[in-house]
């Protein structure tokens, strides 16, 4: 069995990819664009909307019930 981990991206990886794709934009412009996109996603999910980005992923709110603990 091959238990390879799926590739993950963090903010700096996305910034580097966008800098390579759009060399005429400054790093601050790219950072501002990423901020506005992430803020839009967070706001939509906070309002119980489902956000789907084709080829990237789906974001939605998931309810997790509280755990019951017993004090020994």
Image (cartoon, rainbow, N blue to C red):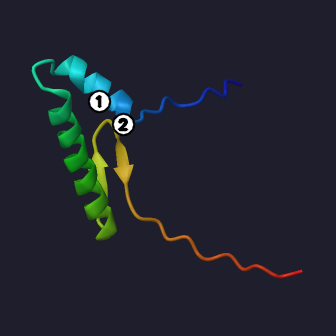
Q: Is residue 71 left or right of residue 9?
A: right
Residue 67 lies left or right of residue 36; in this view the side is: right
Q: Is residue 32 above or below residue 41?
A: above
The x, y position of residue 51, in whole percent, is 29, 55
Is residue 42 depicted above or below 48 in this figure?
above
Residue plotted at (49% across, 71% down): 63
Q: Residues within 10 Å of mark 1 (few under 14, many from 20)?
A: some
Element under disc 1: helix
Q: Which residue is mark 1?
A: 15
Residue 30 horizontal/vertical position (percent): 19, 33
Report the quarter where the N terminus lies: top right
Residue at the spot 31% in from the left edge and 35% down from the top edge: 55
Distance (Cα) linking label 1 and label 2: 6 Å
Q: Is residue 62 above or below residue 36?
A: below
- How dense is the environment of label 2, judged by Cα within 10 Å: few (below 14), some, or many (20 and up)? few
Q: Position of residue 11 (x, y in %)?
A: 36, 36
- The residue tagged 2 is 11
Percent coordinates x, y for residue 50 in the rendering: 31, 60
Q: Residue furthest front?
A: 28
| Mark 2 element type | helix
Residue occupying image coordinates x 36% and y 31%: 12
Between 30 and 2, the residue placed more toward the observer is 30
Label 1 with label 2: CB-CB less than 8 Å: yes
């Amino acid at each position: 069995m091959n238990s390879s981990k799926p590739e993950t991206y963090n903010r700096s990886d996305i910034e580097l990819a966008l800098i390579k794709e759009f060399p005429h934009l400054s790093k601050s412009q790219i950072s501002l664009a990423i901020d506005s996109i992430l803020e839009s996603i967070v706001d939509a999910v906070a309002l119980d909307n489902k956000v789907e980005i084709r080829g990237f992923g789906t974001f939605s709110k998931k309810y997790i019930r509280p755990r019951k603990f017993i004090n020994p």
